[in-house]
Amino acid sequence: MNKINEYPSKAKCTHEQNGYPCFVPAQRVLNLIGKKWSIQIINVLGNGNQVRYNDLREQLRRGWKKNKISDATLSARLAELSEEGVLIRDIHPEIPPKVEYSLSEKGEELAEALQPLIDWTIKTCHE
């Protein structure tokens, strides 16, 4: 089983166990967004536009003098977020192929849920 699927993506909790709610779905989401650059990718795509790979990479690299996102990491995160249904990968049948990324409805909900965390982080960073 690969790392993204440490917790089954189709796991459903139908009831509480021992008085506690089932946290399997939450743990799966936390595992996904806890990976390097996931939150930043979701945040960049959160404006509702479709973004091409190179444009996304450049937006993610702005402001970083070192520790910039690598192509391997960006490709891996995009694949994982797509696999989980957070991103839509739109392939246009052109030569050369044109691929654009955007958030799915699920991804937009996640971006909205993450915004208070991002706001809090920015606020506490500058205190």
Image: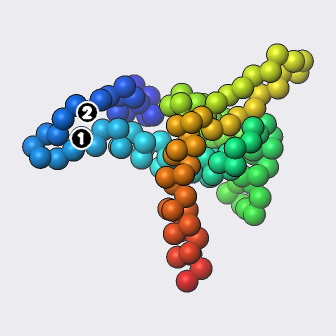
Q: Nearer the viewer, residue 125 or 49?
A: 49
At label 1, counting other C-alpha atoms closer than 10 Å, the crowd grade (few under 14, some 14-19, many 20 or more) is: some
Q: Are marks 1 and 2 in contact (CB under 8 Å)?
A: yes
Q: Residue pushed farthest bottom?
A: 127
In the visual, does 5 lie left or right of 62?
left
Q: Which residue is mark 2?
A: 13
Q: Residues within 10 Å of mark 2 (few under 14, many from 20)?
A: few
Q: Tell me the kind of residue under disc 1.
A: Cys
Answer left or right for 33 relative to 13.
right
Point 35% across, 38% down: residue = 25
Q: Quadrant of the N terminus?
A: top left
The residue at the point 56 percent across, 66 percent down is 119
| Res. 81 in view | no
Residue 74, by quadrant, is: top right
Position of 27 relative to 8 (above/below): below
Pick whichever of labels 1 and 2 is earlier in the sequence. 2
- Look at the numbered disc 1 and give the secondary structure of its residue: loop
Q: Label 2: state its secondary structure.
A: loop
Q: Amino acid at mark 2?
A: Cys
From what the image shows, is residue 41 above or below residue 78? below
- The residue at the point 61 percent across, 47 percent down is 42
| Label disc, if present, on residue 127 of the rendered structure | none
Q: x, y (%) of residue 16? A: 17, 40
Residue 117 percent coordinates (x, y): 50, 62
Mark 1 lies on residue: 22
